[in-house]
Image (tube, rainbow, N blue to C red):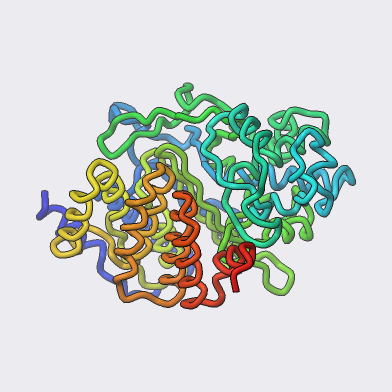
Amino acid sequence: MKNIYTLLLIAFCLIIPVRLRAQTPEQINRVDSLMQAAHQLGIFNGNVLVTKKDKVVYSAAIGYADGSKTKMLNLDLKFDIGSIAKEFNGVSVMILQEQGKLKLDEHLSKYLPELPAWADSIQVAQLLNYTSGLPASAANTDEGLKDELMKLKYLSYLPGKSYIYSYSNVYLQRRIIEKVSGKKYNDFVMQYILKPCKMVNTVMDLPTTSPGMAIAFNKSFINEPYRQDISGWPRLTIADLQLFFTAINHYQLISKASVKQLSINFANGESSLGNAVFEDNELVWHQHQGSNYNYEALITCDLKEDISVILMTNNQSFKVNPLTTAIMAILKGRPYLMPKKSLYLDLREQVLADFDKGIAFYREAKEKKSLQYDFSFEIGELVSTGKFLMRRNRNDDAIRIFELGMLLDLKNTDYSVACQLTAEAYVQKGSRDMALLYYRKAVKKDPGNKIAAAFLEQWQIK
């Protein structure tokens, strides 16, 4: 097996030296070879759609529809798209603003007066880019989120001063949409997004076990239970997702000014559109990744080149981004590399089961398996592992992972992020003094780390 892997790796990891003319059959064959090889190497199982000037130049369903390996994927199957779904509520908020029914600079208390006093200080706009000060939430039901918010006494920081990627922001956006429009959130999305975009194969909150769904499974080919009961999730085909993004990118659902508003982010945080870039008052780049319980999707739109790539998988391997980069390179006639396996995907399971054995696995992989695992952004793999542990309240282990990453030869910005996350883990532990120490380290290493700086300012630390 090792020899087979090595041969495949040599065949597909070589930099392709030939510069190709745009959109040639040879390029499309290269894209197909790339994706088929990725499936054989175990780093992609899903659907692919590539467009040039909004016309499909490549589409494929590659791999299995569930963990049984008895059913194959097809392009008509629906997927969960995780955080990408948050664009739907962002667009809905802007539709209501354009209708004159709400204003982004007004406070939550105007629309949801039943909320505690902190709602008087949060503007609607601050929900859109996660600068509301609302803390991260562990709730996985609407009622759980509502209960957390009603019991919340204090925000994590003054609104607008820093960034926390908290689902509470999305939950409140959806409740505002319902209050202002007088419609259930899903009905509003159907009327103002799905129907105008002709997304006839999209169903809101369709159970993931329903016929017509691709069923998510893990690396052991065991179907993944969907352990979330929060409402407002579109389940859609890859073609419908393309229709949605085409409408946003061409200002068909909301105006250019509204798209630009949704693209605003804080420091290195996400906007409502993920990562969206305007140049000379035009949208030139739009990329958003989302994942949920072994579903993962990535939409990438290079509007300068009129190229878009969508990857949707029901077997998360954390390789949709490098695969998209390779596809883009092929279509632009540039060299590319075949991605390797994600270190994070295996490391997180190892450290979760036994931290010390997990670290031993990491050291062995680094020493002996560099052909198999991707170490090109090693600190990113370790940071992702630490954040995974933090989400499971394994803060001591997360801190050890972050500190291990700090031993690498890092850029100042990467070192600063590792310090910032260490501080956040100490915050979750209730260790304020240690959190302050690492927030200071983060700012000293990178004065441009606005998230760390904002927390120091919030705590009035000079």
Image x and y of residue 184, in percent: 74, 28
Location of residue 17 (image quadrant)? bottom left
Compare residues 366 and 304 and report the one nearer the observer.
Answer: 366
Residue at horizontal 54 percent and vertical 71 percent from the top: 449
Compare residues 193 and 411 and report the one nearer the observer.
Answer: 411
Location of residue 293 (image quadrant)? top left
Q: Is residue 59 visible?
A: no
Compare residues 401 and 338 and report the one nearer the observer.
Answer: 401
Direction from residue 56 to residue 247 in the image, left or right: right
Where is the C terminus found, in terms of image quarters?
bottom right
Residue at horizontal 18 percent and vertical 53 percent from the top: 361
Direction from residue 336 to residue 369 in the image, left or right: left
Compare residues 25 and 218 and report the one nearer the observer.
Answer: 218
Image x and y of residue 234, in percent: 59, 35
Image x and y of residue 219, in percent: 28, 39
Vertical relation: 432 (above or below) 391: below
* Image mark count: 0
Q: Is residue 105 visible?
A: yes
Residue at horizontal 56 percent and vertical 46 percent from the top: 136
Direction from residue 426 to residue 45 in the image, left or right: left
Image x and y of residue 453, in percent: 58, 69
Residue at horizontal 64 percent and vertical 48 percent from the top: 134
Q: Residue furthest front?
A: 433
